[in-house]
Amino acid sequence: MKLVAAAKVRRAQAAVLGGRPFAENLVKTLYGVNQKVRSDDLDSPLTEIRPVKNVLLLSIGGDRGLCGAYNTFLLKKVLQRTKELEGMGIGVKHMAVGRKMASWLKRRADEYELLNGVEMKSLLNPKAAADEQADALSSFAEEVLTSFVDGEVDKVEIVYTKFKSLIGSDPIIQTLLPLTPKGEICDTNGVCVDADEDEIFKLTTKDGDLKIETEKETINTDAGYEGFMFEQPPNEVVDAILPLYMDSTILRSLQESLASELAARMNAMSAACDNADELKTTLSRLYNKGRQAKVTSEILEIVAGADAL
């Protein structure tokens, strides 16, 4: 199962790299639009900042177990954030990706308001066609978008596990909506990462062992829009791009979470194999000691009988 999980991590890596060109062009267009007009002039429903009365927590977990404390750490992060928001008098609503998280919230419907819960495989299914996956992701993102635009919630935060290495991944919280005109992603502490800054991971081997290499890349935001004129008003361009950018952000979070789950499963299966080998060695020693003791006892009985004769 460790090797199977490693192969799936490689596929997750390929998915991240495969979606990168689309994300790069979105970022270039966003920066190009902002070069043509001032941010203050842009008015989009997705960038509207209003008093926060209700927050939607979008949590991304796993469908299965056998992955150590991966789902437990994510659940603790969600409950901690829920308690913080409720302590400030803010209502909290939940949407969950992953069978484990969704079923946990459904069993406690009297404590937590769950708007929707879907399985990870319904959004990221390697056996499904690309068009089918795209439709499933778009409909899910549209549900998140509608809840914000209709005023059902005033802020959307996404809780997922950021992939760092094969031995460590941390659950983080980021603000998904409202978006900034340039597409920065900010955490709950106000620390923002520019949309043109990206970090990708690569699964490699070194001295026969699996190893993760991460590298930061900066997207060239010079799209050459200085000599272009936009036929549509800037607001219409931004309204068309920002939903796509939000879809891209959700997809990236899903891919990172899936890679983190698979890495956790690799470690859990590796630890299980090591424990099984250790148990086998301990039992073999115990059985050998018992066999040797029995043989020694029989020899002593034979010798004692011979001496008696």
Image (spheres, rainbow, N blue to C red):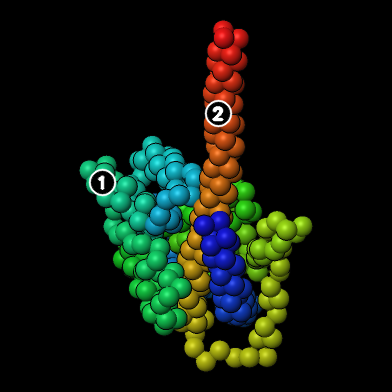
Q: Is residue 280 left or right of residue 72?
A: right
Q: What separation in Å lies between label 2 and label 1 (alpha carbons)?
A: 52 Å
Q: Amino acid at mark 2?
A: Arg
Viewer can see residue 255: yes
**Label 2 with label 1: CB-CB less than 8 Å:** no
Residue 107, numbered circle: 1
Residue at the right extreme, as displayed = 207
Residue at the image point whose x is 49% and y is 68% from the top? 251
Under circle 1, the secondary element is loop
Residue at the top extreme, as displayed = 308
Viewer can see residue 172: no
| Residue 250 x %, y % | 47, 66
Question: Dot 1: few (<14), some (14–19), or many (≥20) neighbours within 10 Å?
Answer: few
Q: Nearer the viewer, residue 74 or 115?
A: 74
Residue at the image point whose x is 48% and y is 44% from the top? 69
Q: Is residue 232 left or right of residue 103?
A: right
Q: Nearer the viewer, residue 153 or 249?
A: 249
Above or below: residue 259 compared with residue 245: above
Residue at the image point whose x is 57% and y is 79% from the top? 22
Residue at the image point whose x is 37% and y is 65% from the top? 144
| Residue 143 x %, y % | 33, 68
Above or below: residue 82 compared with residue 197: above
Q: Amino acid at mark 1?
A: Arg
The quadrant of the picture occupied by the C terminus is: top right
In which quarter of the view is residue 288 placed? top right
In which quarter of the view is residue 199 placed? bottom right
Question: Dot 2: few (<14), some (14–19), or many (≥20) neighbours within 10 Å?
Answer: few
Under circle 2, the secondary element is helix
Q: Nearer the viewer, mark 2 or mark 1?
A: 2
| Residue 234 x %, y % | 52, 81
Residue 291, numbered circle: 2
